[in-house]
Amino acid sequence: MKAIVMRYVVVLLLAFAVPAQARDLPSAEALRDGLEMGYVSSTRIISPCANLPDDYPEAERDAENARANLPAGVCTYPGFAETYARLMFIQAGLLAESRTPFETTDRIQHDRNAVHHCADAACAMQVLDRVLPPYEIEWKELPALDENTPRPDFLIDATAEIPADMLAKVQPMLAGIAELCGTPDDDGAEITYRLRQLTPSGNPVVVASCFTGAAQFPVWMVELAPEGPRTLLTSEDGSNCFILPTLRDGHPDLYCSVRQSAGDHPTTIYVFSGGVYTAGLEMDIQGSLDPETSLAIRFERIGTLPPADAR
């Protein structure tokens, strides 16, 4: 089980920080024809003008939806298909690694809207020529991944174990995760408990997680407040979480990714709002043909985003 968990952690690390030397872009021809995306579904979204086999109806619907947002005639306009796919590919790669995903999605959506709002293909091409260069520069400046690269701060990485009396106080709040995980006696998974300092009050936070055997990491967070324990987060679908630098009401945003398959990682960014963590952003992150490159092919903002604390 430890080996499986370690392989999962390595995949997440690669999704979060990618070596610069592995970030060569596909050729213009590959982007145009959709030959190097790895997944047909991501190809259809990133390169909706690509001419691929018609035996993937769901992916074809994705392409039709993507083309519906574009001006008429763009797929036959000289240079558009390659340039648009290049923009989409770079944006998807940068977003998959971003440690400020809300800022990144705002910028990406703004620039995509500028293309979508054009009345004709010539306008769309002019917008692409304007918005693409800054992304290309950002792509080229991505730091290399080596022994000096800061490691993401895993939520469950804290080494501080919890005193028995403290654990007893929060145990009633953790009935849900206990039910999901089961117990080692009935072939369930052992729950890991860690102590974190994540709140501006300085109250200790108990983080509980387990590996269910299906590449899932249910996560519960309970704050030990003076008035009694309170639940901050329940992630039932299984997540391995990183702590992001952005704070809201003194609480860090959380980047939580689920491993559905070797290259498919639905991801949720949780934000602190109204005394609890709620989903603020959802992304579908997939691997490309290069196993060390990940692409956020879809994203969706959820609800109203509370303001970030001043930096």
Image (cartoon, rainbow, N blue to C red):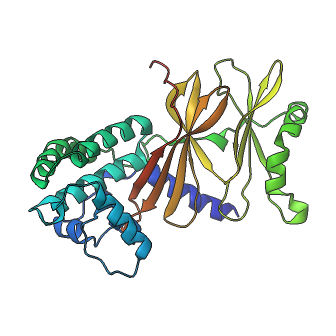
Q: Observer-nearest residue: 44 or 34? A: 44
State the quadrant of the N terminus.
bottom right
Task: State whether residue 157 appears in this view.
Answer: no
Q: Nearer the viewer, residue 94 or 14?
A: 94
269 lies above or below 298 = above
Q: Is residue 124 above or below residue 194?
A: below
Measuring from the top left, give residue 220's x and y in whole percent.
Answer: 73, 42
Residue at position x 58%, y 63% in the image: 260
Q: Quadrant of the C terminus?
A: top left
Q: Position of residue 271 (x, y in %)?
A: 57, 34
Q: Residue at x 42, y 50 (%)?
A: 96
* 253 displayed left or right of 114: right
Quarter of the image where one finds residue 190: bottom right
Residue positioned 30% across, 39% down in the render: 110
Compared to 236, does 252 lie above or below? above
Name above or below for residue 31 compared with residue 91: below
